Structures are given as structure tokens and as C-alpha cells.
């Protein structure tokens, strides 16, 4: 017990008796002024004694902040490192209001997914967007449409990319719109239509020949200029939707890849029904290393008045540290264009809905 020599006899008495518990009670009740003279008006000295006695778990940690804000981070760091298993959940419960402790770890309760964009930097980025803006747009509930007029040729860009199921659906829709009625070569010209026409230049699209029309580029382009003009517009919109969806998916993967340095896996939704019957969905995401995050903050701001008590949410203290002592996340080089296979898959996935819209 060599360390006892550091303290005068009065402190030894406190340590060796139940008197220390009374001092802790007074400290927790905000009566530091009543006992401060016994510790040379030094909160740090009092906490040091409590720590040596193994009674830190009895201290209301926010009282340290109330009495001496400048030692708060350092004392809290010492407390955290002295017994991480016990003190980490205590610190989280007392100071970090948006974190939920579960059996498998610590989860950040988000206001919405856009909150995750706050972990990205705002520096200049291509096409007038910075990393934070892109992350916010990708994570937003609102549909982000950075591209328009992506379809240059409806037949080549849309029809040729359809799978067999959707080509048959297109054929059925064409029969509903222009099938089984006389059409004229004066209005629609193609070699196929000429082969299908009678001596008066009349022809009919039927169930037996409609697939031949679908497979013929000149015939389809001729129809797109006429009675299928509205359908052509729908297919153009489908192409833009498919392109933007593929781009959003690509950027979402990039955003989540960067976030994986802070969080584990993707977010999950918690569903709750309010008293008024409205269902509310709250996103959660698992924090990878909250112990290291808190430790980084407390170490960086020892002796400062910027404390964990003031930045009492995970997002606020983590981003404050990133801004002052760490680094924000940054999206690296991302292709300007999504993959064609992803675009084509989206076209086929959304084709039936757009065909009848």
C-alpha cells in the first residue's frame, strides 16, 4: 500500500473507513462544495481516491463535468480505460443518447439514413457535388435523378435489351394498341410491312406476325413515330429510371463501403406503432468500435472544455473529432457511368409496370 503515502492521514482515514461512501453520496447529490476542502478543492484528487478504492461505478459521472469541465475528458478517459467492460456501457448510457446497447454490440439509432452523410467530407467533388452531398442524395428518401435523356435510340437501347418474357409482353401491348386493324404503307414504311401488305398497301398486325414486327428495327421505329409514339415516350422514361437506379445503386455501394470503416453491415429498420396508429420506421446501424471512438475523442480533447458531455450523441462527438483531429470519409474515384448490365436488368425489372402506365 505504498500509494497511501501520497495522501495525508485524513485521506487514509477516509479510504480505510466507510466515510468515503458518504463523500461519494454528497458528490453525486451536487454537494461538492461541502466536501471539497477535504480534497484540496481538487475534483481530480477525489476521483483518484475513489478509483483506487474501486468505487468508480458508484460515481455519477456528469457531476465531474459540473465541478471541473477541464478535467472531465481526462478523468473519463482514465475511468474508461481502467475497466472497459464495466465502464463503457455506463458511459454510453449516461452520455450518448442515440446509442442502443444490444447483446451483440452497440447500435446507432438514426434520425434518418441521411444522418450517415454527416460522416463524409464536404470538399470539392466532380460534377459540382462533394462527398457529403452525394452521400446525402443517395441515402435520402427522395428519388435522386442526376441523369436525363439517357436513351438515344429506343429500339437499340430498350427493345433490343428485353428478355423473351418482356418481348412477348411488348407484343401483347402492341396488339392492344395497333393490332387487328388495317394500317397503311402511306403511314408506316418498312420492308417487313411491304411483305405483309396487300395490293392496296394495307397490312394488319396480328398475333401470328407481331413477334416478327417486334424483332424488326425499321418496323418498330416506324410505329414509334406514329401510333406507338406515347409508348415510345414511356420506354424513354423507363430507360432514364433504369439508368438512374443503376447509378444510385453503384453510389450506394460506394457510400456503404466507406461507412464500413465506422459501422458493420448495412442499416436495419425497427418498426413501431404509435398510439395514434401510425407506424414509424427507425433505422439502426451497428457501430464497429465505439470504445475506440470514445477513447479517440477523450484523448484528443484532454484539458479542453469541448467534452463528451456537450457532444452527447454519437454522430455529434464522432464528427466533431473527425473535423478536428481525425478525417472525414471521402468517396474515392467512382465511374461516371453505371454498368450496362445493371441498366439492362433494371429495364427488364421495370418494363411491365412502365408498359401499362
Image (cartoon, helix red, strand yellow):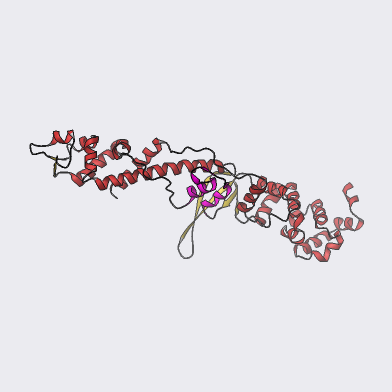
Q: Is residue 190 above or below residue 25?
A: above
Q: Residue at x 42, y 41 (%)?
A: 246
Residue 188 horizontal/vertical position (percent): 18, 40
Asked if residue 124 is among those painted magenta in the image, a careful observer would answer yes
Along the viewing direction, whichever of 102 and 124 lies nearer the viewer: 124
Q: Residue 126, can we see it?
A: yes
Along the viewing direction, whichever of 221 and 341 lies nearer the viewer: 221
How many numbered circles are shown?
A: 0
- Image quadrant assignment for residue 217: top left
In this view, the residue farthest toward the left is 199
Asked if residue 45 is among those painted magenta in the image, a careful observer would answer no
Q: Is residue 168 left or right of residue 349?
A: left
Q: Main secondary structure of the magenta part?
A: helix
Q: Is residue 186 left or right of residue 102?
A: left
Along the viewing direction, whichever of 287 and 212 lies nearer the viewer: 212
Residue 237 horizontal/vertical position (percent): 34, 46
Along the viewing direction, whichever of 62 and 343 lies nearer the viewer: 343
Residue 307 horizontal/vertical position (percent): 70, 55
Q: Which residues are magenta?
A: 112-140
Residue 196 horizontal/vertical position (percent): 14, 35
- Image quadrant assignment for residue 155: top left
Q: Residue 1, can we see it?
A: no
Q: Is residue 341 above or below residue 98?
A: above
Q: Residue at x 8, y 39 (%)?
A: 200
Q: Is residue 166 left or right of residue 100?
A: left
Q: Residue at x 54, y 52 (%)?
A: 115
Amino acid at each position: 500500500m505504498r500509494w497511501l503515502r501520497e495522501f495525508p492521514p485524513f485521506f487514509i482515514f477516509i479510504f480505510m473507513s466507510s466515510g468515503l461512501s458518504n463523500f461519494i453520496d454528497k458528490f453525486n447529490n451536487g454537494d461538492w462544495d461541502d466536501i471539497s476542502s477535504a480534497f484540496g478543492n481538487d475534483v481530480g484528487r477525489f476521483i483518484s481516491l475513489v478509483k483506487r478504492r474501486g468505487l468508480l461505478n458508484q460515481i455519477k459521472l456528469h457531476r465531474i463535468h459540473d465541478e471541473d469541465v477541464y478535467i472531465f475528458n481526462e478523468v473519463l478517459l482514465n475511468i474508461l480505460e481502467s475497466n472497459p467492460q464495466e465502464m463503457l456501457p455506463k458511459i454510453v448510457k449516461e452520455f450518448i443518447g442515440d446509442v442502443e446497447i444490444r447483446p451483440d454490440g452497440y447500435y446507432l439509432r438514426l434520425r434518418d439514413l441521411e444522418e450517415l452523410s454527416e460522416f463524409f467530407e464536404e470538399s470539392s467533388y466532380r460534377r459540382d457535388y462533394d462527398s457529403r452531398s452525394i452521400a446525402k442524395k443517395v441515402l435520402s428518401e427522395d428519388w435522386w435523378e442526376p441523369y436525363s435523356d439517357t436513351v438515344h435510340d429506343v429500339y437499340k437501347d430498350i427493345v433490343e435489351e428485353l428478355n423473351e418474357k418482356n418481348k412477348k409482353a411488348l407484343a401483347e401491348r402492341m396488339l392492344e394498341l395497333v393490332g387487328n386493324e388495317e394500317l397503311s404503307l402511306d403511314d408506316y414504311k418498312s420492308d417487313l410491312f411491304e411483305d405483309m401488305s396487300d395490293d392496296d398497301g394495307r397490312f394488319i398486325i396480328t398475333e401470328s406476325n407481331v413477334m416478327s414486327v417486334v424483332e424488326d428495327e425499321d418496323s418498330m421505329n416506324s410505329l414509334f413515330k406514329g401510333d406507338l409514339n406515347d409508348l415510345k415516350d414511356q420506354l424513354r422514361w423507363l430507360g432514364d429510371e433504369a439508368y438512374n437506379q443503376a447509378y444510385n445503386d453503384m453510389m450506394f455501394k460506394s457510400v456503404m463501403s466507406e461507412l464500413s470503416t465506422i459501422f458493420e453491415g448495412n442499416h436495419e429498420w425497427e418498426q413501431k406503432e404509435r398510439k395514434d396508429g401510425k407506424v414509424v420506421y427507425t433505422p439502426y446501424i451497428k457501430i464497429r468500435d465505439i470504445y475506440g471512438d470514445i477513447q479517440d475523442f477523450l484523448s484528443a480533447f484532454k484539458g479542453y472544455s469541448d467534452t463528451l458531455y456537450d457532444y452527447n450523441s454519437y454522430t455529434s462527438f464522432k464528427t466533431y473529432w473527425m473535423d478536428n483531429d481525425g478525417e472525414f470519409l471521402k468517396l474515392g474515384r467512382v465511374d461516371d457511368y453505371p454498368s450496362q448490365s445493371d441498366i439492362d436488368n433494371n429495364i427488364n425489372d421495370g418494363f411491365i409496370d412502365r408498359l401499362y402506365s
